[in-house]
């Protein structure tokens, strides 16, 4: 047992708690600042990329229109569509298309409308009221929604906006 050193408290050498805490704080601060600056650089790069997107494309996703009512005018081939803009931007209706779902007959083919709808406002679109060229019914005798060929069918009505969004609904004459 001659190789064992005697316990002497004066011979102990260690790092004091204060010096250890300062060393750890320095390591954490340097690593933390590297992570912080890399994160801030990534956020700035993302913000810079977002600045290149056009406002019109951002507004594209804020456009929302619903069909409030579709009225097939009895005894004629006229059609009235009531729309409501529930989006957060003004919309402009560009075209309307109507297709008979049962036989895929195109009733109205990309009719130019060009009517604005303000935010939280209603807009009525009337088709075929003036010159009977917008809606093409090829009925047996009278060419009206009352004809048996059109009376019991469902119609897909699609509107397209100037921004390229489209909204659809399915309707039938006189709720049949």
Image (spheres, rainbow, N blue to C red):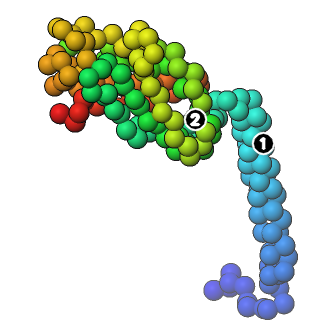
The local secondary structure at tag 1 comes to helix
Counting from the top left corner in percent of width and height, residue 58 is at 64, 35
Of 176 and 101, the residue lying toward us: 176
- Residue at image position (42%, 19%) is 129
Label 2 CA crowd tier, 10 Å (few <14, some 14–19, many 20+):
many
**Residue holding disc 1:** 44
Would residue 17 be found to the left or right of residue 120 on screen? right
Q: Say which quadrant the C terminus sits in.
A: top left
For residue 34, the mark is: none
Looking at the image, is 161 positioned above or below residue 85? above
Quadrant of residue 142 within the rendered picture: top left
Looking at the image, is 163 positioned above or below residue 130? below
Looking at the image, is 115 positioned above or below residue 27? above
Label 1 CA crowd tier, 10 Å (few <14, some 14–19, many 20+):
few
**Residue holding disc 2:** 117
Q: First in sequence: mark 1 or mark 2?
A: 1
- Residue at image position (23%, 26%) is 154
- Residue at image position (25%, 17%) is 144
Counting from the top left corner in percent of width and height, residue 109 is at 40, 11
Residue 75 in view in this figure: yes
Would residue 33 be found to the left or right of residue 117 on screen? right
Counting from the top left corner in percent of width and height, residue 75 is at 26, 23
Spatial CA span between label 1 and label 2: 37 Å
Counting from the top left corner in percent of width and height, residue 120 is at 56, 46
């Amino acid at each position: 047992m001659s190789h064992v050193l005697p316990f002497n408290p004066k011979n102990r050498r260690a790092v004091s708690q204060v010096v250890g805490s300062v060393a750890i704080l320095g390591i954490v601060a340097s690593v933390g600042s590297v992570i912080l600056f890399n994160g801030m650089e990534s956020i700035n790069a993302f913000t810079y990329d977002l600045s290149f997107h056009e406002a019109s494309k951002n507004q594209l996703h804020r456009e929302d229109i619903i069909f409030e009512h579709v009225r097939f005018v009895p005894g004629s081939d006229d059609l009235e569509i009531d729309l409501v803009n529930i989006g957060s931007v003004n919309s402009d209706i560009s075209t309307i298309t109507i297709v008979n779902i049962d036989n895929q007959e195109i009733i109205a083919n990309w009719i130019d409308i060009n009517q604005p709808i303000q935010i939280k406002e209603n807009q009525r679109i009337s088709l075929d009221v003036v010159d009977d060229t917008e809606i093409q019914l090829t009925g047996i005798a009278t060419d009206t929604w009352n004809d048996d060929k059109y009376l019991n069918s469902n119609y897909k009505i699609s509107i397209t906006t100037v921004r390229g969004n489209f909204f659809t609904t399915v309707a039938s004459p006189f709720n049949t």
